[in-house]
Amino acid sequence: MSSTPSPQETPDNLVPTSAPAPMKMSAAVAIVEGAAAIGYGIYFAITQARMGADEALVESDTAAFAFVGVGTALFILAAFGPMVYGAINILRGGQWGRSIIVFINALLLGIAFFMFSGGAVALGVTTLIAALLALGCALHPASTDWATSNFNKRRARQQR
């Protein structure tokens, strides 16, 4: 017996394929979004550590008020960190990451409109454009076909 697997054991059609260009573009946008958000969170935490909590940002008399910057930074890291990880995974040829890119960018659509109502129009427009670009590319037919194909390949491997 040879140690080389037979063609039935490792058919070429079960090998995952690299992400298509639209999905790679979505991943690149997600990395930029994540870097900007995480950078802002770090800035916010450092600013709070240096100058204390900014009373103009939050109205609160609780002891937790002093930790708003650090809490915000941790939340941003928890939300955007996995998205950046997934985006890097996709660019490296992996398959995990598309769903979280879609989820976070769907949330960013709503956040963009809150930015408009809060007077941060330029940031709102930037956020809206980035979210629409990431969503449009992640939900592009080529990206959807790629995700479906890879899912079907994983299912076929599990059923063998």
Image (cartoon, rainbow, N blue to C red):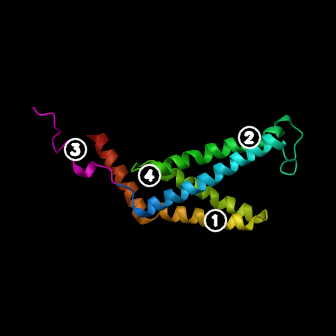
| Quadrant including the N terminus | top left
Instruction: Say what amino acid the circle numbered 1 marks.
Output: Leu
Q: Picture quarter containing residue 78?
A: top right
| Image quarter in which the C terminus is found | top left
Identify the secondary structure beneath mark 2: helix
Q: Dot 3, crowdedness within 10 Å: few (<14), some or many (≥20)? A: few
Numbered range of the magenta stretch: 1-17
User: Within the magenta stretch, is there residue 7?
Assistant: yes
The kind of residue on which mark 2 rests is: Val
Residue beneath disc 3: 10
Where's residue 141, x and y in %? 42, 65
Q: Which residue is mark 2?
A: 70
The residue indicated by pointer 4 is 90
Q: In the depicted view, which residue is nearer to us: 19 or 88?
A: 88
Residue under label 1 = 128
Any part of residue 38 in sight: yes
As measured in the structure, the alpha-carbon distance from the residue carrying label 2 to the one carrying label 3 is 49 Å
Counting residues from the start of the chain, the first of labels 1 and 3 encountered is: 3
Disc 2 residue crowd, few under 14, some 14–19, many 20+, Cα 10 Å: many
For label 4, the SS is: helix
Compute the Cα span from label 4 to label 1: 23 Å
Mark earlier in primary sequence (2, 3): 3
Residue plotted at (65% across, 65% down): 126
